[in-house]
Structures are given as C-alpha cells and as structure tokens.
Image: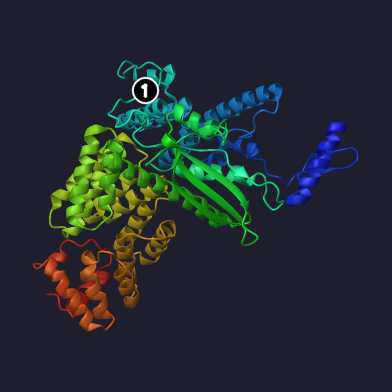
Amino acid sequence: MTNLRQTLLHTRELEGRYGFDLFDADATEIELNRDVVLDLREIGRVRSAEDAPELERLIGLYRGELLAGVIGVGNEFDQWLALERTRIENQFSTQATEAALRIGGRGAHSALFRLAERLPYSDVVCRATIELFRSENNESGARAAFAAFRNRLRHGLGMEPAAETAELFGHDDETIPAQPRTVERRRPQADEDRARVSFVPRVVLLPPLQDFKQASVPKHLAPALVEDVTIGLSRLKSLSVIAPHTAWQLDPFTALDEVRAHQIDYAVESRIAPHFAGDGLSLAIRLVRAAGREIVWADKFAFSALTAPERYWDFTNGVARALAESIETAELQRERTLRDANAYSHYLAGRQNLRTFDLPKVRRGRKSLRIARDIEPEQATIESALARSYVVEWVLRSGSDKALLDKAKLHAERAVSIDPNDGTAYRELGRVALFDRDLDQALVHMSTAAELAPNHADILADFADTLAHNSNHREAQEKIEAAMRLNPIPPDEYLWTLGGINFFRGRFDEALANLSQMRNPEPAYRLMAAAAAMAGQMDLARRYRLQALRLQPDFTTARWLSRVPQRDPSDVDLYIDALHKAGFK
C-alpha cells in the first residue's frame, strides 16, 4: 500500500504539472480516467478493422515497441518488458496482416506497406504481402516483395528470412548462410570507412539528450520527437534507417564506436532545451560520419510543445528532409574527394543532374544512372530515376520524340516490378500516361504515387501538374503549395507548374512573377510570353517570344496543339489565343 500511495502521489504531481488526469481515485477505489485513450487498447481493435482507412489509422498507432527507451530498471522488470514487447509485436503483426488480407485491394497493399515501415524485419508482414500479391495472380509482385524483404534483412541484420517465408518459393530461391554480408571494394586509405553493406547509407538516430531542469520541457517530448523524425526518414528511399529498438540501446555519449561496429555510416545526435529567445523549445541536431567522427552538418530548430498537429508534422518532416539532404551532400562530397565512386554515388550524381532543366546535364545524369544500374541492377530507385530522365528530355524537346516516353515507361514498369511500393515509379508511369494523352490513367498512377509517398514533395508537384492538365486548377494549386511547404526553396519545375496554374486561373501577373524566379527559365519562355501578352506587357511578350523561337525556331501552335494533353478545350483556346497575341504563328 505504501508503494501504491507513493505512486499515486507522484502521479498527482505529474498530472498537475502537465495538465492531465490519469486516474480517478477516492478513499476506497481507483480506476483509469474514462477520458484517457490507451494506444494499446486501440491497437487491439486492429483485427476487427472494417476498411482500409481504419486499418491504416490503427497501424499508425503502433509507433514502436512498448516503453521504448526504458532499460536497466532491474533484471525482473527487464525480463517482463522483453516478453511483453515480443508478445505485443507478434499479436499486432498477426492481427493486422489478417485484417489486411481480409480487406484486400489497393488499401490492403497500402496498409501492409505502412506496417512494414513499423516492423521492417517481420516475416509475418512479408508473408502476408506475398499472399496478397498471389491472391491477385501477381507472382512478379510477390517475388519482388520477398526480394526487398530479404535484402532488408541482410543489409540491416545480416540475417536470412525465416524458413517458413523462404519456402513460399520452394527451391527457386537461393539459400545464403545467415551471416553478415560485406562488399569488398577499393579503399584509398587503410583507416577508411569499411565497405557499405547497403546500396544506400545507413543512419541511426541516437537517443536524445534533454535538459530536464526546466519544468517547461516535458520528459516524453524528446523521445517522441526523435522517433517521429525516424519514421519520416524511414519513408525515404535514399537512405536506410536503423530501427528504434536498436538505436535506443546505444549510449549517446559513447555510441560512435558501436555504430561503426554495426557498419552504420552516419549517427544523428540531438538535444532539446528551452529556447533562449522565448517560451518555445530548441532542437539542436548534428550529423556525424561514423568513420573519422566528422561532423558534416549541424543546425538548430525552434518549435513549441503545443504546436498544432499539422505544424508538428511539417516540423518533423522538415527535420527529416534536412537530414536526408545533408547525407546526400556529404556522400557526393566524399565521392569527389576520394574518387571512389560506388553505385550510390553515381545515382546521386545522376539525380542531381536531373534537377536542372538543361538537356546536356539531363543526358549526363542518365549516363551516371546507367553506371549505377550496372553496379546495382536490382534497385527500383535507379530504374525510376532513369525513367525520369526520359520524361524530362521529352518535355525539354517539346514532345518531338515518342520513343522517349516508351523508354520511360519500360524503366518505370521495371521499377514497379522490383519494388511495388515505390511511389516514384508510379509517378513516372503517371507522367508517361499524361504526355501520352491518357489523362484518366495519369490521375490513377499519380494518386497511387501520392498514397505510397504522401510527403514526397516532388510527387506532389507532379501531381499538381497532372491535375492542371486535367483542368482541375484549384486542387492543382493546393497540391503545388503543399509541395512548396515541404520544399520551401523550390526547384524550377515547381515554379513552372505554379506559373501555369496561375495562368489558367487568369492570374497573369502572378504567373509572370512565378516564372521569373526560375533559375533557368528557357523551357518556360513560351508560357512567359503568353502571360506577358495577356497582362498587357507586349514588349516583354515580344522579348520572351524571340527567346523561345531562338531555342525552337520551328515551333508552331498547330504542332503544339497536336501534342498537348489538356482536358478542358477552353484552357487550350486560352493558351492558343495568348500565344497568338504574343506573336507566335
């Protein structure tokens, strides 16, 4: 009873400090406050989920193992906690996969994808995904799902799938001993980083440090914040994130030696403290390369513990994106310094060239991507990027070569066969369908891409452009604005898309302002001339028309009309009239 009273007193102190009521108690009875929502209780409802949205919501409640980060309390408690963690995970994965298979369809695929994000090494989830593909007579999808899971296990844990999972493919699958795999490659110095076991860099977010002296800093906040950043990173294809279960076993003060032992490339150290300039909080982050303990990036972010949910997710996704971009920059710099390019380095170099709207650079980027594919032939991300290179070239050449779209489609379809959950592959299928004038199929593919990667800024931007070509300009504007919130220093194609949307909404001055911000406005000169003409700036329209014709002297509105995909004829009429007004023939 003494321990119970002390627990209640301590709980009351916490309730008063943080403004919540956990228990209702009087002199004789104690019970849980009925307004309290327990995630474990909600998660237990996953088996009876009636549809895909409810299943995804319940899966989203599973944020990791029970009492993540709690260790060293005592042997008896630690043993109980380990058993409970295993029991809850096994029960949850079994019930969630049963529900997904019962629901079926695209919603089930999306739910299993989210489940695999949270349980990346679960054979149960892998087997359910295989079963779902086979129920749809999609054997290639089943094999791709197994291959992706096997690679994840090998690269992450150095293990093989369970026999029960491997037996789903009989003797077709190769059998490899369950031991860590290393890839030998030339290293310029004896003390250089050991060979990478994964195509992409491996990163771990260490347990955060936190200033507990201030009552304004809730103790639960730092672990939750770092965990949410981890989840944001895990959705990206450009790096591999160590699961929180392993990360939280590491001591942030002495972790770097152990990080290198696990063949992890980067560690993220963080600290939360009150912000010196106000009532908010400050998150300090630094990215450390495990080899050599080099700090490659550091920054501080201000935020509030009371931030509205949508702002909170923008914040955590922004931190994740900043980390990912910093890792890419560090990897490119490393390759340039050491002259020791691997597949990932070639992939990054290729993708960087695709971000420009410069045809020679796009072709140079494709060459780098082909080298990356020769080294790593089973990477969906490389195939998607190759598809992208042909789509961008088709745009830059004003749709003059249909073969470019055919090549893009082949690479995108191969990416889907390797990884059916690759949102960028569906994006490229959507772009091909759009430029092939199949507007309905373009929307289907872009919707799938957005479902698989809802926080991928480039996918949202291309979705916006697809909606604009479908003459849904209001929703297109919402999508491009969402993309620009995720990518606040937007690349040229975002500005081009936004300028086009504003043009078709009759906001010609705004369209000109958007397009004028492009670093390389050459691809948009025709649209700029049209917008200037409609805005009454005829001298400016003439200048842009001459610049456009210098680049494409054989351009005619009739030829453009035969290629443009646009749902509403009135949009086409508006643009043609504007081009004629600007002086085009």
Q: Quadrant of residue 530?
A: bottom left
Question: Which residue carries the number 1 mark?
Answer: 181
- Residue reaching furthest right? 27
**Mark 1 residue type:** Arg
Q: Could you say which is closer to the camera, residue 294 or residue 13?
A: 294
Image coordinates of residue 403 in percent, x first then y, are 14, 49
Q: Is residue 545 left or right of residue 321?
A: left
Q: Could you say which is closer to the camera, residue 508 or residue 570?
A: 508
Image coordinates of residue 565 in percent, x first then y, are 23, 61
- Residue reaching furthest front? 190
Q: How is the image coloured?
A: rainbow
- Residue reaching furthest left? 554
Q: Is residue 95 above or below residue 16?
A: above
Q: Is residue 55 left or right of residue 510?
A: right
* Residue drawn 77% across the image and 48% down it: 15
Residue 17 seen in render:
yes
Residue 556 seen in render:
no
Mark 1 surroundings: few (<14), some (14-19) or many (≥20) residues within 10 A: some
Q: Quadrant of the N terminus?
A: top right
Image coordinates of residue 143 in percent, x first then y, are 33, 28
Q: Quadrant of the C terminus?
A: bottom left
* Residue drawn 52% across the image and 42% down it: 269
Image coordinates of residue 116 in percent, x first then y, are 46, 34
Q: Quadrant of residue 174?
A: top left
Q: Quadrant of residue 222?
A: top right
Q: Secondary structure at mark 1?
A: loop
Q: Is residue 488 above or below residue 55?
A: below
